[in-house]
Amino acid sequence: MGKEILKVNIDRKRQKFSKEFKLNAVRLLKAGQKPATQLALVLGIRRNLLYKWAETLAAHGGDVQTAFNGPGHNKLGKPHTLFALRTNGLNANWRV
């Protein structure tokens, strides 16, 4: 009934990239001198990361001060929707 889930490589760690690295990668992508695939290979990252970083920067209106702060949670300074719903629900429904 239950399937056993095996991880391929349990020692694999997530890569972390600095804000400067992300900004430079997006700048190179926007320059358009190399295709995104080639740029990703040179930088040693996945191509879709370039597009995600460009989208994140665009979502912040190109403001380098607010983009890429922290581990990627809490976009645009808004509280997480599920967290807000839970805390509001607790405040409304669980009064003592």
Image (cartoon, helix red, strand yellow):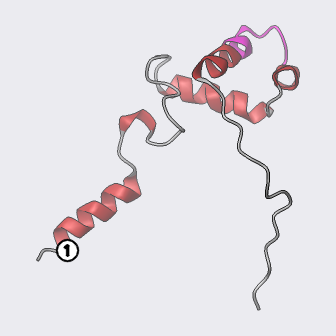
Residue at x 79% of width, y 53% of height: 11
**Residue at coordinates 67% horizontally, 14% vertically from top-left?**
24
- When asked about the image quadrant of residue 51, the answer is top right
- Seen at 32% across and 64% down, the residue is 86
| Image point (53%, 27%), residue name | 68
| Residue extending farthest bottom | 1
Total marks in image: 1
Q: Quadrant of the C terminus?
A: bottom left
Instruction: Give percent across and percent down for residue 63.
Output: 46, 16
Q: Is residue 19 left or right of residue 77?
A: right
Could you say where residue 10 lies in the image, as x and y percent from the top left?
79, 58
Nearest the viewer among 14 and 91 is 14
Q: Which quadrant would residue 40 be assigned to in this image? A: top right
| Viewer-side residue, 87 vs 71 | 71
Assess whether residue 83 is covered by the magenta stretch.
no
Q: What SS does tag 1 mark?
A: helix
Nearer the observer, 59 or 78: 78
Which quarter of the figure has residue 52? Answer: top right
Q: Amino acid at mark 1?
A: Asn
Question: What range of the chain is rendered magenta?
Answer: 27-35
Q: Quadrant of the N terminus?
A: bottom right
Q: Is residue 16 above or below residue 92?
A: above
- Asked if residue 6 is positioned above or below residue 45 in the image, the reply reads below
Indicate the position of residue 88 as horizontal and vertical percent values.
24, 61
Q: Taking 1 as reference, is 73 above or below it?
A: above
Per the image, the residue denoted by label 1 is 93
Crowdedness of circle 1 by 10 Å Cα count: few (<14), some, many (20+)? few
94 and 81: which one is in front?
Answer: 94
**Is 21 left or right of 45, judged from the image as shown?**
left
